[in-house]
Structures are given as C-alpha cells and as structure tokens.
Amino acid sequence: MKKIIFTNILGIFSLLLCAQQKSEDFYYCKEEKIFTEQRTDYVFVKFAPNINREQLLSLIDSYASLQATNNTNLESSRYRYAVLEAKDGKQITEAALESLKAREEIVSVS
C-alpha cells in the first residue's frame, strides 16, 4: 500500500514538474532535454558578404535603439554577423525587426 501511494505521489510530482516548463523549444545535450528561452532584447543579424566594414558600422549606428555586442564578426569576408541588443535593455520592437529584414545588406534576422 505504501508503495502504491509513493508511486502515485512521485507520478503527480513528475507531472507538475513537466507542466512548469513553458517553452516548447528545446534541444538535447548528452540525452538530456534542455529547454530554451526566447530572448527579445537581442537579435542575430547576418550580413551580405559584399558589404564593407564601414557600411556595416554605419548600418548598425543608424538604429538608435540598438547596439552591437562583443559577439560580432565584421572582419570575415565570408561570414559577417552581429548580435545586436536593445540599448535600454528592453524588448526590441517589431518595427525595428521588420526594418532590419527589409534591408538589402542583411541576409537574415533572427
């Protein structure tokens, strides 16, 4: 009887623990499921390979609400990208994201 009660309590506890995971995005590392959180104060931007460094810096500076982080590679001619963050630490607006996506110099925004 004690074994059944213990098993039921353990089952309920497991269900509650799984229900607390809000994110549906996850990956596996060494057979362990790792849940991810979507960040809205950072954005990853990949630039076209034919744009030069000065144009990249000018493009980034044209967005008053964004600034480049240390995770930025503007030197490579093959892979130029920047991780931009909101200057105020708040959410990057949808308008800013759409504006970035519309630029010819930008290949992808995520």
Image (cartoon, grey):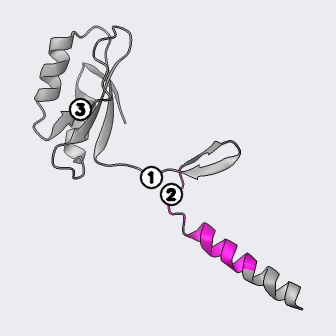
Residue 93 as seen in the image, left or right of residue 7: left
Q: Earlier in the sequence, mark 2 or mark 1?
A: 2
How would you rate the neighbour count of disc 3 (Cα within 10 Å): few for under 14, some for 14-19, many for 20 or more? some
Q: Residue furthest right?
A: 1
Q: According to the image, label 3 marks what residue?
A: 100
Return the x and y of residue 70 as percentages of the image width and height.
Answer: 28, 30
Left or right of 35? Residue 12 is right
> Residue at label 1?
37
Residue sticking out furthest to the bottom: 1
Nearer to us of marks 3 and 2 is: 2
Q: Is residue 19 above or below residue 103?
A: below
In three-dimensional space, the C-alpha distance between marks 2 and 1, rounded to whole angstroms, equals 6 Å
Task: Report how far apart the C-alphas of labels 3 and 1 lie in the structure.
Answer: 22 Å
Rendering coords of residue 108 (x, y %): 35, 27
Q: Position of residue 101 (x, y in %)?
A: 28, 31
- As helix, strand or loop, the secondary structure at mark 3 comes to helix
Q: Nearer the viewer, mark 3 or mark 1?
A: 1
Position of residue 72 in the picture relative to residue 35 (left or right): left
Q: Which residues are magenta?
A: 10-25
Any magenta on residue 19?
Answer: yes
Magenta: main secondary structure equals: helix
Q: Report if the CB atoms under discs 2 and 1 are less than 8 Å apart.
A: yes
**Disc number for residue 69:** none
Quadrant containing the C terminus is: top left
Residue drawn 69% across and 42% down? 30
Residue 57 in the image: x percent, y percent? Answer: 16, 20
SS state under label 2: loop
Q: Badge 1 local density, few (<14 within 10 Å), some, or many (20+)? A: few
Q: Amino acid at mark 3?
A: Leu
Give the labeled residue for mark 2.
Answer: 23
Amino acid type indicated by mark 2: Ser
What residue is drawn where x is 78% and y is 83%? 8
